[in-house]
Structures are given as C-alpha cells and as structure tokens.
Image: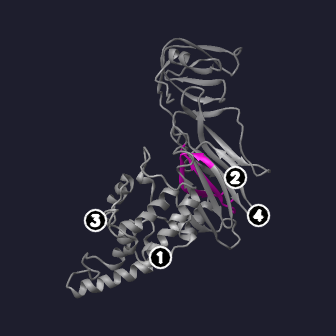
C-alpha cells in the first residue's frame, strides 16, 4: 500500500488548512495530526493508491472477484458517482468518505484523471480474468462485509510465531520466508465467490512463482500458516462448508512445487502443533453432534494422515483444548453398560440420571458416565437416531 502518495496529498491539505487558520494539531493537545489523517484516509479504501498510482498485478494479489469489482467502482465512487445497482450503493454508503452526487447518466470518464481511467480499465480486465462474466452485482444474499482492504502481516513476527508452533492468520497476501532459505516468497489467495455459485468457490493460492487452483465450499479469503518441524511453514486455506462444517486444506511450498498435503475437517484456529503432530477436535456422530480429540501427522509420502487411536476423548465442545463436559444429557430409563468394549464383559445396570459421554472408539462404542458414579461402555453401532432419543434426553444434535 503506497501511503507516501496519500501522505503527500494530505500534507498539502494540511498546509492549506493551516494557512486558512483551520487547526490540524501540534502534537500535544489531541488535534488531528498528519499520521492520523493518513491512517483515516487509507483505512476505508480497498486500493487507496488507485487515485494517483498506476496499479500493477502485485497490487491486486489476494483480492477476491468481489473485491476487484468494488475496487474498480471505488475509483468512480471517489469522484461522486452514483450507481444503478443496489449492492455498490450499500457498500459505498457505508464509507464515511463517500458522497454520491452524480447520476450514472451524467457521469463520464472525462471526470477521471488519466491514471484513474487506466486503473479502472486494468481492474476491469483483472475482474474478467478471474471470471469471464465478471462479478455479478445484486445477486440474492450478497454480502458487502466480505470485502476489505489488503492487510499485510508483519512477516518477521509471523514467521517466529509459526516456527514456534502457533497457527497464524497471514491475510490474503503477504511476503515471508516459507522454507527458511533466506529469501521471502510472495503468497496470495484469490477466491471467486460466484463460481459456479455462492457456495462452491474457486480459489487460486500462489506462493513465489507457483500456484494451485482448486475449489471449496464457502471459502475464507485468508491464508493461514504454521510449522510442524520448526523449520518449514505449511500454508492452509479454509472453508466453512455448507453448514458450518470447516475444512482446512494444507500445502507445502518448495522451489519445485506447491504440494497438496491433505485436509483436516477443522478450522485453522482450532489446530495446535505439538511435538511434530497436529492436535484438534473433529466431528464424530456416534452420540449426536460431538467431537473427538485426535491427531494428524505428515507421513513419509508428504501426506497428511490421521493417527488412529484405540479410544478417543469425546466432547460436545468442538474447541481444542477445552474443559471437560458437564453431565449435559439425561438417561431416561435403566440401561445395561459393560466394563469393556465387549458385550461379554461384566455388565452394570445404570438407573436414570444425568450423564455425559467422555470416550468413544469413534465407530460403535461410547462410554456413558453417570453423575452418580455409575458408568460403562455402550454399543450403539446399530442404534437409530430415534432410539438414541428414546433412551437419552438433551443430546446435542444439530443436523
């Protein structure tokens, strides 16, 4: 973001205001200062430099199709143009700087500077490169809040945090040393939210001179990163899914390839790197909409693999880590449970009481723990949804 151009314009404005006797602050009494003016002026634009600087491909890296369209119209909006479509009117009316006074019929390109006109044409070309039909305005359910300016994350602190095992949001574009060879790679993510519909989206992830194109459901237009080995940084793109079913897709960068490693059905901010493995909680429907605590590793074939466990910690809470469940369900009738995951093992008859389900094998067996201290393993492999409801109240079932 080329703030120096905005700074020069605002500096000139500050001189004029000062000459007119309009106060701009002296640094001691809370008046408006130049730095604050720069920040205020640039924070609410997608591409603040488009007014006085010729844009290049680097300026639009990481912008979605919708954001490119809005950035193009932002050039006209600065000049006071009104819009026939409701979507851009909703968006620009939410900006403090916008004052639309010129109807579309009365607005001509002569009102733009040569640089603004060139940038508008450039952004129109970029828009149609992302999608041949361009961004379609006023589609049902359009969301103007998905669009924001480009935010750069401090690469040095981000790399240090990732190498320490933390998952870091890198924004839609950044520059950082992915393989710790002393050279920063430029990374960006572009999402087409209208391909082929608002749910299934196409994305392009770029790292250095390499890129991959794929699709996801309800994509987030941000890149995440972290390191398993304290040396190399893995890139993550995530999707919300059709019904709040998050998926994180992993890529590893080398000079030769941007390799797909696999997916974890969890959001990036719900992943923890610990001892060379990824720990998280993923959905498991053995006893309703609940989650098992599980681990993933990158194997010798550079493939993300879930590590099988005999028994998993089971919880109604999807966040990792989190506190132990309370006794949230209620056993409505007497129930036979077993000491082991074996119908031939010693049995106990539980009486009606509050219960929870702290463990499962993720397939057929769940441990029922009662508030009275009774408990044991219950086979539910052949139980229907209705049978679960007949035996227990207050199960967590979202779908």
Instruction: Report the disc number at residue 256.
Output: 4
Task: Specify whether 245 is left or right of 235.
Answer: left
Q: Which residue is mark 2?
A: 276
> How dense is the environment of label 3, judged by Cα within 10 Å: few (below 14), some, or many (20 and up)?
few
Foreground mark, 2 or 4? 4
Can residue 49 be seen at all in this image of the molecule?
no
Location of residue 97 by image quarter: bottom left
- Secondary structure, magenta segment, majority class: strand
Question: Mark 1 or mark 4, which has the lower sequence index?
Answer: 1
Q: Which residue is mark 3?
A: 101
3D distance between C-alphas at marks 1 and 4: 32 Å
**Mark 2 neighbour class, 10 Å CA radius: few under 14, some 14 to 19, many 20 or more:** some
Instruction: Specify which label sits upstream in the sequence, 1 or 2.
Output: 1
Reading the chain from its start, which is encountered first: label 2 or label 3? Answer: 3
Q: Which structural element holds mark 1?
A: loop
Q: Secondary structure at mark 4?
A: loop
Label 2 and label 4: CA atoms lie apart by 24 Å
Instruction: From the image, tell me which residue sits under label 1.
Output: 2
Question: Few, some or many C-alpha atoms within 10 Å of disc 1 (few <14, some 14-19, many ≥20)?
Answer: some
């Amino acid at each position: 973001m080329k703030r120096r151009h905005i700074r020069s314009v605002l500096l000139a404005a500050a001189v004029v205001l000062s000459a007119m006797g309009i106060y701009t602050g002296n640094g001691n009494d809370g008046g408006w200062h130049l730095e604050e003016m720069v920040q205020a002026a640039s924070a609410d634009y997608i591409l603040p430099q488009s007014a006085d600087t010729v844009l290049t491909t680097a300026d639009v890296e990481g912008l979605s199709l919708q954001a490119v369209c809005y950035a193009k119209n932002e050039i006209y909006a600065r000049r006071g143009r009104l819009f026939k479509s409701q979507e851009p009117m909703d968006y620009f009316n939410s900006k403090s700087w916008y004052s639309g006074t010129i109807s579309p019929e009365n607005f001509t390109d002569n009102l733009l500077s040569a640089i603004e006109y060139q940038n508008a044409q450039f952004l129109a070309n970029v828009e149609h490169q992302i999608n041949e039909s361009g961004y379609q305005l006023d589609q049902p359910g359009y969301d103007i809040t998905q669009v924001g300016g480009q935010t750069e994350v401090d690469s040095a602190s981000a790399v240090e945090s990732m190498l320490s095992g933390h998952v870091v949001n890198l924004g839609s574009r950044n520059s950082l040393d992915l393989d710790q060879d002393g050279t920063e790679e430029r990374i960006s993510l572009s999402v087409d939210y209208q391909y082929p519909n608002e749910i299934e989206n196409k994305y392009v992830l770029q790292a250095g001179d390499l890129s991959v194109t794929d699709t996801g459901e309800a994509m987030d237009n941000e890149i995440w990163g972290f390191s398993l080995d304290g040396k190399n940084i893995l890139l993550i793109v995530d999707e919300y899914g059709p019904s709040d079913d998050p998926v994180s897709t992993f890529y590893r960068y080398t000079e030769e390839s941007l390799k797909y490693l696999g997916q974890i059905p969890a959001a990036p901010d719900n992943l923890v790197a610990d001892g060379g493995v990824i720990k998280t909680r993923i959905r498991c429907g053995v006893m309703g909409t609940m989650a098992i605590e599980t681990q993933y590793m990158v194997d010798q074939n550079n493939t993300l693999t879930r590590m099988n466990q005999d028994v998993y910690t089971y919880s109604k809470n999807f966040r990792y880590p989190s506190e132990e469940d309370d006794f949230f369900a209620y056993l409505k009738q007497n129930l036979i449970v077993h000491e082991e995951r074996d119908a031939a093992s010693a049995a106990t008859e539980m009486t009606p009481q509050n219960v929870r389900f702290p463990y499962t094998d993720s397939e057929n067996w769940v441990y029922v723990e009662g508030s009275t201290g009774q408990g044991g393993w219950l086979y539910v492999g052949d139980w229907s949804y209705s049978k679960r409801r007949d035996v227990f109240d207050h199960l967590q079932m979202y779908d």
